[in-house]
Image (cartoon, coloured by chain):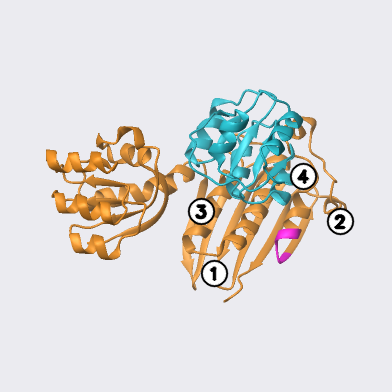
Chain colours: A orange, B cyan
Amino acid sequence: MAEELKLNLNLKRIKKVLKADVIQGKGLLSTKISGVYASDLVSDVLAYSKSGSVLLTGLCTKQVAISAYLSLFKAIIFIRGKRPNKEILEFAEEKNMIILLTENDMFEACVKIANADSNSISKFVKLIESSEKKNTSVHKFHIDGQDFSNSGLLSTQIKSILQNIGYEPYLIKRVSISAYEGEMNVVMHAKEANLTLNANEKEIQIIINDRGKGIPDIEQAMQAGYSTATEDQRALGFGSGMGLPNIKKNSDELKITSEVGKGTKVEMKFYVIQE
Amino acid sequence: MKLQEIIDKVGLKKLTNVEVRNVQGVFISDMLSDVMTNAKSGNLWLTVQTHKNTVSAANLINLAAIVVTHGKEVPQETIDLANRFYVIILGSDLSTYELVSKLIGIGLKP
């Protein structure tokens, strides 16, 4: 059984979701880990795992600890309530490795760790639907206007979705910045909106459809420095009049349509350059 | 330059968890769109903004750390969010200008 995931997690969070006990390396729990490798075969650990990961295993022998050390694992989590003996603990202490114990079985532990990463964001974000259509990954979200408490987190979630698909970092950055500006415009100026993310191997598209006051003069709104933000919003660092120009700068296509008193639709596209 | 070296040399307060990171350059602004457009990945971001949105901005463009100047107090919710997303927030009692002169003094390039 082998499972590897790209994660953005530390062991504190893993300890929490697995309700695990730390029996070695309590002081090292804020260590960030690069992935998880789940296996009960020592030779697989040596052959396939990547450094900086955490090993999930039900095999409680010193050979596992040694191979984990050689494969540059940061931590071992013993599952199914297995308890390592003194020899393993001494080895781990000497090599500065972290050891956790959990009652979960392999499948439960894998699922809980995988969920922990996305849960950390998605609990703040309202997902309406998520699907795969014709090789396109589709996500639809709801944004509340005037809700500054969670603003910016939807863009963070979008970034993480794009990272999981595996786009190149510069493209992800351009999409993230544009999504952030779009999200902020809704939070500042509209009542509510739906944001749809369509991502496939050719392009990434974001459509934000809001219900709000609309834009009377789109050309004017596109001018750098033009803003209708309130004093309070400016005090938070918004309203520099760079939002729409920023989207224009970072996207490959931008289309804005608006009806005063009803709302605004912002459609942006980003081309995926094939290598 | 290593973030820890900067923290030690100019005496910054750690307001969140801190991990090993490299710093490449400094960006100063209190306007979020300005940061999103002009700051580069790996920059140290000097600001007086302490709102939660700074965390999203820093995360989205992979800044090395946020440094809140003028000794401004950072709300706990901002710190909690930053820890959740591995965004590092540091604090300084110096003004932005004084801090910049110190950063130049230790050899940090723009």
Can residue A103 be seen in this snapshot?
no
* Image location (x, y in percent) of residue B43: 64, 46
For image coordinates 73% across by 26% down, the residue present is B95
Question: How many residues crowd around disc 3 within 10 Å: few (fewer than 14), some, or many (20 or more)?
Answer: many
Q: Which badge, 2 or 4, is on the more N-terminal residue?
A: 4
The answer as to whether the residues below labels 2 and 3 share one chain is yes
The answer as to whether the residues below labels 4 and 3 share one chain is yes
Can residue B11 be seen in this snapshot?
yes
For image coordinates 24% across by 45% down, the residue present is A77
The residue carrying mark 2 is A219
Local secondary structure at mark 2:
helix
Callout 4: chain = A
Left or right side of B94 for A159: left
Q: Amino acid at mark 1?
A: Asn
Q: Which badge, 2 or 3, is on the more N-terminal residue?
A: 3
Distance from disc 1 to disc 3, alpha carbons, whole Å, reads: 15 Å
Q: Quadrant of the N terminus of chain B?
A: top right
Local secondary structure at mark 4:
loop
Left or right side of A92 for B100: right
State which region is magenta: A249-253
Q: Which badge, 4 or 3, is on the more N-terminal residue?
A: 3
User: Which one is in front, A134 or B104?
Assistant: B104
Local secondary structure at mark 1:
loop
Q: Which mark is residue A213?
A: 4
Q: Amino acid at mark 3?
A: Ser
* Image location (x, y in percent) of residue B92: 64, 27
The residue carrying mark 1 is A200
